Amino acid sequence: MSQMTVFKSFAELANALDLDALSAEPIPDESVDRVLPEPAAIPPSHLAALLEELQRAGATLTAIARRDEEARAEAFRDLERHDALLARLREAERARDQAKQVRREAEALGKQAFSDEARKEATRIVSITVQAEVAATDAVVYWQEEVERLAAQLDLERLLAERCRREEVDKAKAAEAERARRLAGALARARSALEAGRFEEAKGLLGAVTSENPCNPEITTLKTIIAQRELTVRVDAVEEALWEARRLYRHDSAAAVAHLEALNLDGLPEPVARQVFGEWARACSRLCQERGITEPLRYAPDLGRGAVITRESPDGPYIVVTALGMGPDWQTGSTVGERQVRRARPLR
């Protein structure tokens, strides 16, 4: 029976456990990462041998690819032979079928013929067609056997699938070449039209090939150039119209207003649109003074767009005196809605 030891103090417990001996042993530090051995470096001599082996492997692959292409070409030559034999077979079948048809017609004529000469000639033709039918049937059997013999030597299904794949690749290449030809032609004609100032024609030519080449950089660049040229031409025309309107303003404000009303300001640079609008408003102000229009209002919803409105009577609705870039609903004399009137400001 085991005896139970009773310790009267922690000192007695320490002596029993021999804590001094335990503390002398090193305690592993779990926080320190275990150092793994580094992989052995490849000696330079071994690396040179490895590169040499890779070069040999590359040369072997090249040779294998060449032999595979030769085998493929030979297989396709066999497939062409199969096609030729099959064509001979089909030709023999057509000859056999034609001989049968002519024989039946000759036999029917022989039975129905009235004269002896006709029956005799029909009998002769029957004899000829029978011989032709037999010969054609023999040819069918012969060529059928040849086709089957060659087909047994070939992986026909695989060859036919490969030929279909090649035909699809060739079609895709031809389609790509045709697409490139259309693109080159359209680009050349569009550039020519651009140089001649025929912007709409140039854009139409590009539009025809853009769907086929949605991300083509040449098309994108040319469209940008066309837009820039168009804008330059429009700005020049507007500036010329501004000069003419200023000249007309001195002696004919109505003509100046009409001249500016005809301009299309959509897409023009903001400074140009502001100049046109300012000159138009100035001409409108003089026009209203000349016509005795009191308290005219100016409605300007957007840059480069506006209308001068007034009342013909104190209680009457507001009507359009003149409009710039407002569209067909803002013709001279048309009635203006209350919402637009509330947003209008006095014309100065």
Image (cartoon, grey):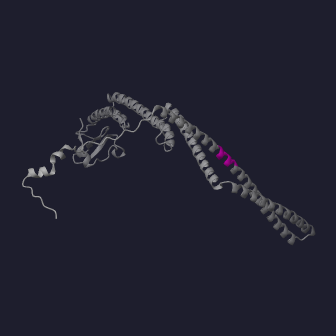
Report the label total: 0
Vertical position of residue 23 compared to residue 96: above or below: above
Asked whether the viewer can see residue 78, the reply is yes
**Residue 89 falls left or right of residue 75:** right
Residue 307 x %, y % = 30, 41
Residue found at the very far front of the displayed protein: 1
Q: Nearer the viewer, residue 201 or 240?
A: 201
- Residue at position x 16%, y 62% in the image: 2
**239, above or below 125, in the image:** above
Residue sitting nearer the eye, 336 or 42: 42
Please tell me in which quadrant of the rendered image residue 131 appears.
bottom right
Which residue: 51% across, 34% down? 49
Residue at the right extreme, as displayed: 116
Over which residues does the magenta segment extend? 70-77
- Comparing 99 with 151, the one in front is 151
Query: Please, is residue 65 above or below residue 283 in the view?
Result: below
Question: Is residue 73 found inside the magenta-colored segment of the image?
Answer: yes
Q: Does any portion of residue 197 appear in the rendered image?
A: no
Q: Position of residue 93 (x, y in %)?
A: 76, 60
Q: Position of residue 165 (x, y in %)?
A: 59, 50
Residue 77 point in image, percent of width and height: 69, 47
